Image: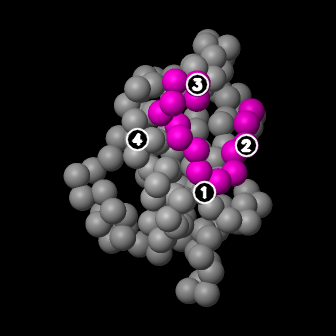
Amino acid sequence: MLLNFWATWCPPCVEEVPSLEKLQQDLDSNDFIVLAMASAFDWKDLAKFFPQGTPLTVLLDPPSNKQETLGVIAKAFGIPRIPETFLIDRQGKIRYYFTNTRTWNLSVAQTCIQALIDESN
């Protein structure tokens, strides 16, 4: 699983989303999922952001109050800012942790992720 913490108000996150969508499409199987945890208060902003839908599995991670920007789950992970991403193996162990924006649809990224998938099989 690639667990990505992001928000629609975050320019680097918005820049990263298309490569996450492409990654999900390219590695789509029962062995891999991109889980996008969106720091947002409701689904309206997310529906506007993805008017045609998305191949990503998007979950809402609302902040605890209106003064906060990061969601409760993001904060529980100890994330100080977004985007941040965790690559988690089949046993639930965090194998890799990435800060800031990445281009996930590059062949080198897909090869590394595929190697982890193959290792777990």
Structural crowding at the residue carrying mark 4, measured as other residues with C-alpha within 10 Å and reported as few (<14), some (14–19) or many (≥20): some
Q: Residue at x 69, y 51 (%)?
A: 99
Residue ID at (46%, 55%): 15
Residue under label 2: 97
Three-letter amino acid code at the position of disc 2 = Tyr
| Amino acid residing under circle 1 | Pro
Does 72 sit above or below residue 66?
A: above
Please, is residue 51 above or below residue 36 in the view? below
**Spatial CA span between label 4 and label 2:** 19 Å
Q: Which residues are magenta?
A: 95-109
C-alpha distance separating marks 3 and 1 = 20 Å
The residues tagged by marks 4 and 3 sit, at their Cα atoms, a distance apart of: 16 Å
The numbered mark at residue 83 is 1
Q: Give the residue number, with chain letter if any, for mark 4.
A: 21
* Image spot of residue 54 (x, y percent): 32, 47
Question: The residue tagged with tag 3: helix, strand or loop?
Answer: helix
Mark 2 element type: strand
Quarter containing the N terminus: top right
Element on which disc 4 rests = helix
Check disc 3 and give the amino acid type: Val
Q: Confirm whether the magenta stretch covers residue 99.
A: yes
- Residue under label 3: 108
The quadrant the C terminus occupies is top right
Q: Earlier in the sequence, mark 4 or mark 2?
A: 4
Marks 3 and 2, Cα distance to the nearest angstrom?
Answer: 16 Å
Q: Based on the picture, tell me whether residue 120 belongs to the magenta stretch.
A: no
**Marked residue nearer the N-terminal end (2 or 1):** 1
From mark 2 to mark 1, how far is it between C-alphas? 11 Å
- Residue 92 location, quadrant: top right
Between the C-alphas of marks 1 and 4, the distance is 15 Å
Residue 57 seen in this snapshot? yes
State which tag comes first along the sequence, 4 or 3: 4
